Image: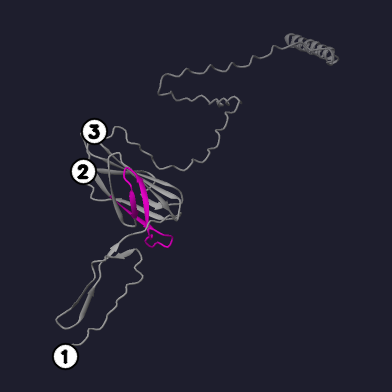
Amino acid sequence: MLEQESPEVRVLEINSNQYTLDGGSVVAEVDENGVLQIKFTNIYTPTEQSGGDMTLAISKWVRNENTNSRFEFQLFLTDGSGAALAGSYPYTGSYAGSISDGGRFYLADGESITVTGLPEGTGYRVVENNVRGAYDVIVSGDSNIGSLTENRDVTFINIAPGNPGGHEDPPYYPPEDPEPEPSEPPEEPSEEPPEEPSVTPSEPSDEPSPSGPVSEPDPTPEPELAEPTLPQTGQLWWPVPVLLVSGAAAVAFGAFKGRRKSRK
């Protein structure tokens, strides 16, 4: 049986990015078919980035319950194109460490962390995982989804029904409302006196009013006749003597005729 020298085999791993090769994890073996199998084990070791000066603060409060439980959160980060943001970024506060896209962290009542060194314009989304159904969750301050055009401060408040307890007065920052548009000043009242309503007199009706008796109107007085007056200066007087003489002649003539009849 002739022995043959084993050929030398070299395998290189390149473009490992943020992964490092576990020194004792390279395994080379020949399977039953005579095929050489080489297995590599890589360890993810993200490098901290400091490409920006934006910060993202995340706080946790619990109302109506005394609890020391820690609640799980997850942070998603994207770059300007919407792809996952590369690298990891340091955080400080109740805990210290570094976090990258999709990283998890835990906060109890009253605790917070602040992620620093994030590039301006980074998209972020903060999610609270595995919230029990008994809690009502309120997000105050800045939204839990947005873009780092400025430093952001996101607060999660869990409210448990009944059993008052927990933090007495957790801060609540309602979203800013847009400034109301200035309203026009009210019109000043006019100094002119109000007009009195005009009343048009109505003609009296012959029918009685249903609300009560109606007094009859006073009868219109008849016009008095003027007494006859004597003729005034300027009237004609010459016919008067003529009429008197004619009357006397008529009386004398009548008497004369009466005497003649009596003689016959």
> Which quadrant of the rendered structure holds the N terminus?
bottom left
Residue 84: image location, x then y, percent: 37, 61
Q: Residue at x 29, y 50 (%)?
A: 105
How many residues crowd mark 2 within 10 Å: few (<14), some (14–19), many (20+)? few
Mark 2 highlights which residue? Answer: 134
| Lateral position of residue 254 relative to residue 214, left or right | right
| Lateral position of residue 89 relative to residue 32, left or right | right
Above or below residue 156? Residue 230 is above
Residue 40 position by quadrant = bottom left
Residue 26: image location, x then y, percent: 24, 70
Asked whether 37 or 83 is in front, the reply is 37
Q: Residue at x 86, y 15 (%)?
A: 238
Above or below residue 19? Residue 151 is above
Residue 260: image location, x then y, percent: 76, 11
User: Label for residue 2?
Assistant: 1
SS type, badge 1 = loop
Q: CA distance from mark 3 to mark 2?
A: 15 Å
Q: CA distance from mark 1 to mark 3?
A: 84 Å
**Mark 2: which amino acid?**
Ala
**Mark 3: which amino acid?**
Gly
Above or below residue 79? Residue 37 is below
Mark 3 highlights which residue? Answer: 165
Residue 158: say if magenta.
Answer: no
N-term mark: 1 or 3: 1
Residue 91: say if magenta.
Answer: yes
SS type, badge 2 = loop
Marks 1 and 3 close (CB-CB < 8 Å): no
- The residue segment tinted magenta is 73-99
Viewer-nearest of discs 3 and 2 = 3
